[in-house]
Image (tube, rainbow, N blue to C red):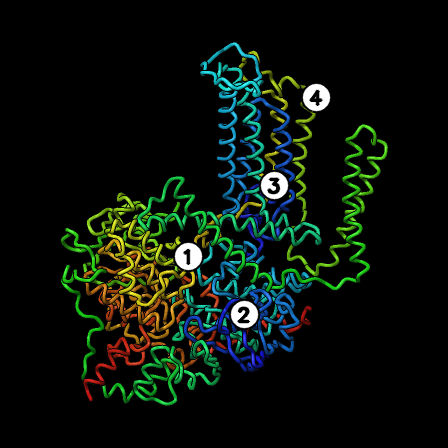
Amino acid sequence: MTAPRGSASPASGGGPVRRTAERLRAPRADRSNAVHAGAWWIWALGLATAASRTSDPLLLALVAAVAGYVVAARRTDAPWARSYGAFLRLGVFVLGVRVVFAVLLGSPIPGTHVLVTLPRVPLPGWAQGVRVGGPVTAEGVVFALRDGMKLAVLLVCVGAANALANPARLLKSLPGALYEAGVAVVVAMTFAPHLVADVARLRAARRLRGRPDRGVRALLQVGLPVLEGALERSVALAAAMDARGYGRTARVPAGVRRATAALTLGGLLGVCAGTYGLMSSTGAGYGLPVLLAGLAAAVAGLRLGGRRTVRTRYRPDRWGVRAWLVAGSGVAVAALLIAASSYAPAALDPPAYPLTAPTLPLWPALSLLPALVPAFAAPRPDTPAARGNGDRAVPPTRKRPRPNARPSAPTTRADDAPDAPTALPGDDPDATARAAGDPPTARPSDGPNTPAARGDGDPAARAGDGPGGERRGAGPEPGGRRPHPSRPAATEPPVS
Amino acid sequence: MIRFENTTITYDGATAPALRALDLTIPEGELCLVVGASGTGKSTLLNAVNGLVPHFTGGTATGRVTVAGRDTRTHRPRELADVVGTVGQDPASHFVTDTVEDELAYGMESLGVPPETMRRRVEETLDLLGLAELRDRPIATLSGGQRQRVAIGSVLTVGPQVLVLDEPTSALDPGAAEEVLAVLQRLVHDLGTTVLMAEHRLERVVQYADRVVLLPGPGAEPVTGEPAEMMALSPVHPPVVALGRLAGWSPLPLSVRDARRRAAGLRDRLAGRAPAPVLARVPAAGLAHGSACGPARVPVAGPLVRCAGLRVRHGRTEVLHGVDLTVAAGETVALMGRNGAGKSTLLSALVGLHPPAGGGVEVAGAVPHRTRPAELLRHAGLVPQEPRDLLYADTVAAECAAADHDAGAEPGSCARLLAELLPGVDPACHPRDLSEGQRLTLVLALVLTARPPVLLLDEPTRGLDYAAKARLVALLRGLAAQGHAIVLATHDVELAADLAHRVVILAEGEVVADGPAAEVVLSSPAFAPQVAKVLAPAPWLTVAQVRDALEAAS
C-alpha cells in the first residue's frame, strides 16, 4: 500500500519525450501524496465563483461538465465520494423548483411569446403585488431556467469538492481551539449515512409486520424509532469518545484562561461593533479600525485557546506542488471569468428579452478550461481492481473450485482435520489432504492456544480472509508465541 | 492492576444494586472472564473499570475501584483513557472517524502523542492485528471481524495496560472469532496486557481465561476463582463443561483438548451405542394444527420454500449467485457461513425485501417480491437480526393488538400466543425493558400471529445466554413439530447441532454444502459442535444425546 508505485515508468523504451511524459504523469493516490482537502475546496469555490459570474446556459453547462470530468477522473470509491450523485440530483431539483415557481407566480421579465395562460387566482387586497397564475411567457421560463441553472451549477461545484476531498480531513486542518467543534461536525457527517441506513432498515421491518413500506406515512411512522436509534447511538458514541480521551485538556494557568476569554469575547464584540460602524452612515470613520482590532483580538484568543488542547495531528495533509496546481487552477478560472465580465459583459449575461439562441463566447469558454488541470495533476485514485480487494466487505478473491459440493465424511472427519477450522467442507481438497497429514503439533487438541496455531497450520484454508494471511509466516509451534513488534507503549512514557 | 474494593453500584431509580459487594483484584497480564446470565451486571462491572460507571451513566457507587493506581472516583473516563482501552458491544458505535488509519490514530491525537510516535505505533498496530491491507479502507466497508479488530486496534495504539471488551466475539462467525481471540492471546502473552472481558459464547473463550468472575444473579454476591472451579458452580457453561459434569470429570475440562484426554472412558461406555437422532424425523406436512401457533393450512404440495438459481444484487455487487434451496414443512434448516456470505440476503429475499436479479423464489405458494406485505405475512415471517426493529408501540399489550390488526387475526390471538410462548410477561411492560430473550420471543409471537407456515430467523441467539437459548430451542422444536418450515441463519454451531434437520453452508453467495445436520457439521471442523469434537469419530452431537444414552445404559 505504501510502496511508491504508479509513477514508476512501465515503458522502458520510447524517446526522451515519452519518458518525461511518464515522469510527469500523476502518481497513484495514497495517503502520503493526497492533495490537501483545502486545495480541492479552493478549486471548487473558484469554479463556483466563475459560474456565479455568468448566466449563459452554454457556459454554465461547460462549468458543470468540467467539474464532472474532474470528479469522474479523480474521485475515489469512498463513501463521501458517492455524494456527488446526490448533489447532481439536488441541482436538478432546484432547477425544477425555480421553473415551477416562475410558471406559477409569474416572472418580472417582459415577454411576448405567451406559451399558456393559467387561470389567475384572485388574491385579497393585502396580497397586492403577488400574482398567482396568469400568462406564462417563453422569456420568463427561459430566464427562470438560466437562473435555476446557475444555482444548480453552484451546487454541483460544492458537490464536486465534497466528492474529491474527504470532509473530515478538511476539518482536521482547523486551528486547535476549534478542534472540538470540528469533531462534532465530523461525527454529524458520519451520522447522516447511519440515519439513512436506519430508515431503510426500519422501512424493511415495517414490511415484515405486514404494513406497506412505501409512501409518506411509512416514512413518518419510522421517524420515531429512527430518532430513538440515533439518540441511542449518539449516547454510545459519546461514551466511547469519553473513554478514548476526547476532551482531555492541558492545565493552563488561570491568568491565561482569563486572558483567552477576555480576548475572544472582546474580539467578537469588536467585530460586531466594527461591522455596525461600517454599515451605518455615521460610524464609517471608526468602523474599520474597530473591526480590525476586534479580528486581531479574536484570532489571538483562538491561538491562546489552542493551548488548552493537548491534541496532536496524525499525518496531516501536506500542501505540495500538486495542491498548488489544483488550488491555482480554481483561482485562475475565477480571476479569468471576473476579468471577462468586464470585457464581455453582454456575452456572459445575455439578455432574456428578446429571445435569442444562446451562444458560446470563445474567450470566456477557453478561460474555463484551466479548471481541468486537477484531472491530470492530482494523484490518480486507486481503483478497486488495482487494490486487490475492492470496496466490498468480503474480498472477492475467493473464487475457489469446489469439486465436491457435498461434504465427504470419510476424508474430513472432525478429528482428522482439526487445524483447518475455517475450511469449508470440500472447498479445498488440498487443504483437506494437507490437514490430514499435518504434524501433530499444529492440532488444536494439542495446544490450548489454538487460534494462532490453527491460523498458522493451514494458511491455504484462510487465504480468502485477507488479514488472515498475515499470520502465514509463523512457525508451526502452538501458542502463537512468535516474534512480533514490541509493545507499542514500551518506549514511551504514558501521556497524562 | 485492577482492584475492586467492596464495590456496590446502584443505578438511579433501580431498587436493587446492579453489582453487589464486589471484591476483586486482577493482576497484570491476566485474561479475566466475566460470566453470568443476562442482566446480572456484567456490563456494569466492565464499565466501572473505565469510569463510565458512574461518571457517564449516573448512579451511585460505593467502595473503590482503582486501575493502575488511579481511583475512578477522582479520575474521569477521559483521564483513564491512557491506561484503559474499552471496546463496547457494538464496534460500529465506537468509531469516530471514517478510515481505518485515522481511527487507529484518533485516541493518540486526543492524548497529544507526538506525531512521529503516532506514526510508528499505527504501523506497529497495523501489523500486530493484521490490518495492514485495510489501512486506507473506509470503515463502513469492513466486515464484522475486521471491524472488531479495528476497534481493538484503535484502543491499543494508546498503549493501555488494561483492555476491557464487552462480548467481542458474539456477532462474529467462528473464523472471525478466532482471529479476534488470537489477537487477544498475543496481547496477553507477549505484551502483558490485562484483559477483562464478558462473553456469552463461553465455548469460544473459557479455555483462554486465567480467572473467571461469576455473577450468579441479582442479590447474590460475585464469586471469583480458577476457571475450572467456577465452571463447576456456574449456571451458564459451555457444552464441554456440561459433558464433563455429566461424566463426573474433575477438574472439569475447559477445552476440547482437555476433554478428549479424559474422554477415553466415556467413549468406551458409549461404544456400541448409536446416538438417538437429535430431532424426530421430519414430520409429514400438516400433522398438527391444534395449537394457537400452528401454521395456517396452505394449499401447497411439496416444499414450502423453493429457490431455484436465485441471484440477488446489491447495487453492482452480486451477493447471491444461483442459490438452490428447498425446505419442506416441519423441517428446520440452518444456514451457516462466514459474515458476508449472503445468509441475511437470502432470508430477506425470501420475504421479498430484495427482488431477485435472476432465478425464481417461492414461499408457501407466493412469489415474495410480488406479494403485498399484508398478504405475504400469511406466507412467511422473518425475525430480523435486530428484533427491536419490529417494535413500535410502548407496551407489550399495544404491540400485540397491533399485530392482531396487521395480520387480520381476531383480537387477542397474539396475546394468547404470547402467553403460550412466554408465560408471565407483564402486558403493560415497555418492550425495551424486556431482556434480549424475552424481546426475541415477543417478536416471534408477533410474527406468528398471522400463522405463516414459513418462519425465518436471522441470528436468533445473538446476545442470548444459555438459558434463553435453551428456551428458544425448545420453542422452535415445538413449532417445527407443528409443521412450520424454519430457516435460521446462524454462526452458532451448537444451536445448529441442537435444532437443525439440515445444514446449508453458504460461501461467497453460493451453496457449498447441503445435507443432514449431523453429516455436514461432523465433516467440517469449523462447524462441528464441541461434543462432536470430544467424542469423534463417534457421531455424537449434543450433551442431551449422551445423557440419554448413558441413562438408557444404566
Disc 2: CA contacts within 10 A as few (<14), some (14-19) or many (>=20): many
Kindly tell me whether residue B103 is visible in this rendering: yes
Q: Choose the circle earlier in sequence order: 3 or 1.
A: 3
Kindly tell me whether residue A385 is visible in this rendering: no
What's the distance in space between the residues labelled 3 and 1, CA to CA?
Answer: 33 Å
What's the distance in space between the residues labelled 3 and 4, CA to CA?
Answer: 30 Å
Of badges 2 and 3, nearer the viewer stands 2
Residue A18 coordinates in the image, percent (x, y):
58, 40
Q: Are marks 3 and 1 on the same chain?
A: yes
Provide the residue designation for mark 1: A394
**Total tally of numbered discs in the picture:** 4
Residue extending farthest top: A112
Residue A389 coordinates in the image, percent (x, y):
45, 54
Label 1 is placed on what type of residue?
A: Val
> Element at badge 1?
loop
Q: Residue at left 58%, top 80%? A: B3
Provide the residue designation for mark 2: B47
Of badges 3 and 1, nearer the viewer stands 1
Label 2 is placed on what type of residue?
A: Asn
Q: CB under 8 Å between callouts 4 and 2?
A: no
The mark found on residue B379 in the picture is none
Q: Are marks 2 and 3 on the same chain?
A: no
